[in-house]
Amino acid sequence: MKTGLTKRQKTTCIYFDEASKTVEIQTHNTALKKRLAQYAAAYPNLCRQTDDDEQGGLTFEIDRRRFAVRLTAPYSDERRQAASELAKGNTNRLRNAK
């Protein structure tokens, strides 16, 4: 969808305060919009779309207890190497199974 907005202008904003029971998420991110729309369809009592800015951005309101921020530590070199070896082994097994 052509919106006339630059990538820099296509933001995701998350708003909540300590008193509110909901979180407001405004986003232009396609993957996040799809995930939120699917969640809203499955759980309308916990999440709903509240606005469409007609420039590709959607706004959702979600129950605060359902919202989380996940931070992940970077892989160590050893863990990265082990994951690489595991992936290579799985790829070879899949090729041999055909």
Image (spheres, rainbow, N blue to C red):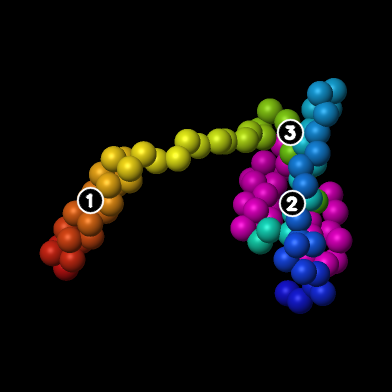
**Mark 1 surroundings within 10 Å by alpha-carbon count, few (fewer than 14), some (14 through 19), many (20 or more):** few
29 left or right, relative to 6 = left
**Residue nearest the observer in this picture, 56 or 44:** 56
| Residue behind mark 2 | 12
Q: CA distance from mark 2 to mark 3?
A: 18 Å
Q: Is residue 48 magenta?
A: yes
- Determine whether 65 is above or below 37 in the image: above
Q: Which residues are magenta?
A: 31-58
| Residue behind mark 1 | 85
Q: CA distance from mark 1 to mark 2?
A: 36 Å
| Residue behind mark 3 | 63
Q: Residue at x 64, y 46 (%)?
A: 39
Q: Position of residue 95 (x, y in %)?
A: 18, 66
Q: Position of residue 73 (x, y in %)?
A: 47, 36
At mark 1, the secondary structure is helix
Q: CA distance from mark 1 to mark 3?
A: 41 Å
